[in-house]
Image (cartoon, grey):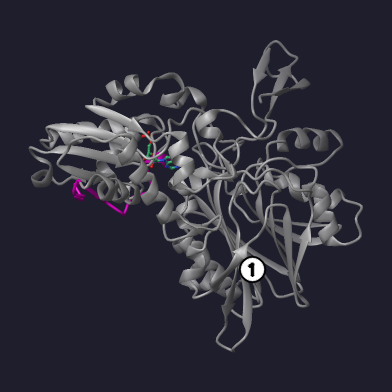
Amino acid sequence: MTNCVPIFDDHFHDECGVFGVFGHPEAANLAYLGLYALQHRGQESAGIVSSDSTDLYPHKAMGEVEEIFTPAVLAKLPGSIAIGHTRYSTAGDKALLNAQPIMIDCNKGKIAVAHNGNLTNAAEWRRRLEHRGSIFQTNSDTEVIVHLIARSQARNFSAALGDALNQLEGAYSLLVLTPDELYAVRDPRGFRPLVLGRASSADGGEAWVAASETCAFDLLNAQYVREVEPGEMVRISKSGIESIRFAAEKPQQYCIFEHVYFSRPDSIIFGRSVNLSREMLGRTLAKEHPVEADMVVPIPDSGVPAAIGYSLESKIPLRMGLIRNHYIGRTFIEPSQAIRNFGVKLKLNPVRNLIAGQRVVLVDDSIVRGTTSRKLVRMMREAGATEVHMRISCPPTISPCYYGVDTPTKEELIASSNTPEQICKYLGADSLGYLSLAGLKQAVNDTEGRFCTSCYTGIYPTDLVQLEVRETASNGMGPIEAITVERES
Ligand code: AMP
């Protein structure tokens, strides 16, 4: 019997936010606030590990940052160094086991790791390491990093970390904590963002902070200093900050979806304002797909900046024709189709007296399965819209992300097997317009081709490895006999 299964449950589903602080008397409190600002990057579990320079203190739990880190919990996280992580994973993989930071005690001492991104050769490494006797405690790709650190023969920790990373492929923005050092690291292609900043403490001291997005710095009144460069390891210790280049340069592959959807509009990502990008996406969309209509209605919150851009460019007034209930989670997280369908209604409601008798342009950032847009088109018609035109501020999503954005399988992506005309029909819209890839690149000012666009092209910048597991016994319960590796790209 042959099964094609990913070794890691969370294989390529790992949307996360990371935050770190070095040299602040209230490090855990800062980490809590930083994670609070990064909550949109993951709502399923969160964790903080702090250090008082001699030992590490962890706390991880399922749920949102605010509910996990009560004053009593934070009081048990002493010291002036801390890293934190907030994580979203798909249904069926809700184990606390996989919450981060991952903490281990090994021949290099105590280490904690917070990872945003996804390693594309982690399964291959895990198989090799398990073959040699390594015991894994989670099914997260991140655990491979700590095993490789522990196995390194290098004398100092930064070299061991470099050794480990040079054997890995894929996306990682990492914060690594030892009792007296904080490392901020970005993979050589720079898929996911990671920024450095300075925060002051009440005693007049200056601390270093690192985060997935600058919006975390704003909350702390910290100053944005710069990005961690692709292929750079920033070591922060009592003796100061040091930049170590651990890998040769590779062509940059910044995730374009951070600008389309994932990051907050008030953040600076890859050196550019996300809001600026999103308004440009909307403006370009209006030029590429103009339509005669009475109002532009954003799908809140993700469609708002692009809708503003569309309205500014087309001179069609922007109206808040859909109201969002902010007190429920993202519909995308719901585990079954039935709940997801219900969820749209739970989350968004039309303003009937605005919509009735009007020709409406609905703007959203993306279509994944098509469930949300279909419901919303119907909702608009039921509210009396005479025409509903759907506009999407990115190209059709045709292929899954293997670098840390949660996307369903290719089969579930409506645009992987349907043309825009077929999708328009499925949505029940009068017209549908997707932004072109060229328009998207122009809107994020990608003149040098530095962005990864694989979800729109199906062309991946790294090898992708899938493991095929063969079971020997006819009942399918036998031991794993052979594993073949198949490359996708
Ligand atoms: P769907 O109903 O499956 O087409 O989902 C579309 C909605 O999901 C859009 O409103 C997007 O803003 C949102 N969305 C797109 N990508 C993601 C993601 N990776 N995580 C959560 N929500 C997403």
> Looking at the image, in which quadrant does ligand 1 appear?
top left
Q: Quadrant of residue 479?
A: top right
The answer, for residue 69, to whether it is visible in the render is no
The answer, for residue 320, to whether it is visible in the render is yes
Where does the image place residue 249, in percent across and percent down from the top left?
A: 75, 48
Left or right of 218 in this view: 294: left
For the C terminus, the quadrant is top right
Q: Is residue 228 magenta?
A: no
Where does the image place residue 406, in percent across and percent down from the top left?
A: 51, 39
Asked if residue 57 is positioned above or below residue 173 in the image, the reply reads below
389 or 130: nearer the viewer:
389
Q: Residue at x 7, y 37 (%)?
A: 357
What secondary structure is the stretch in magenta mostly built from? loop
Where does the image place residue 3, in percent across and percent down from the top left?
A: 65, 18
480 or 9: nearer the viewer:
9
Asked if residue 226 is positioned above or below residue 62 in the image, the reply reads below
Where does the image place residue 156, in percent across and percent down from the top left?
A: 88, 62
Q: Residue at x 61, y 35 (%)?
A: 9
Count how many numbered circles sit on residues in the image: 1
For the N terminus, the quadrant is top right
Q: Residue at x 61, y 65 (%)?
A: 226
Name the residue type under label 1: Ala
Residue range (magenta): 316-333
Identify the residue under disc 1. 82
**Mark 1 surroundings within 10 Å by alpha-carbon count, few (fewer than 14), some (14 through 19), many (20 or more):** many
Q: Residue at x 81, y 47 (%)?
A: 148
Left or right of 36 in this view: 200: right
474 or 318: nearer the viewer:
318
Q: Is residue 322 magenta?
A: yes
At numbered mark 1, what does the secondary structure look like: helix, strand or loop?
strand
Most distant residue in the top direction? 474
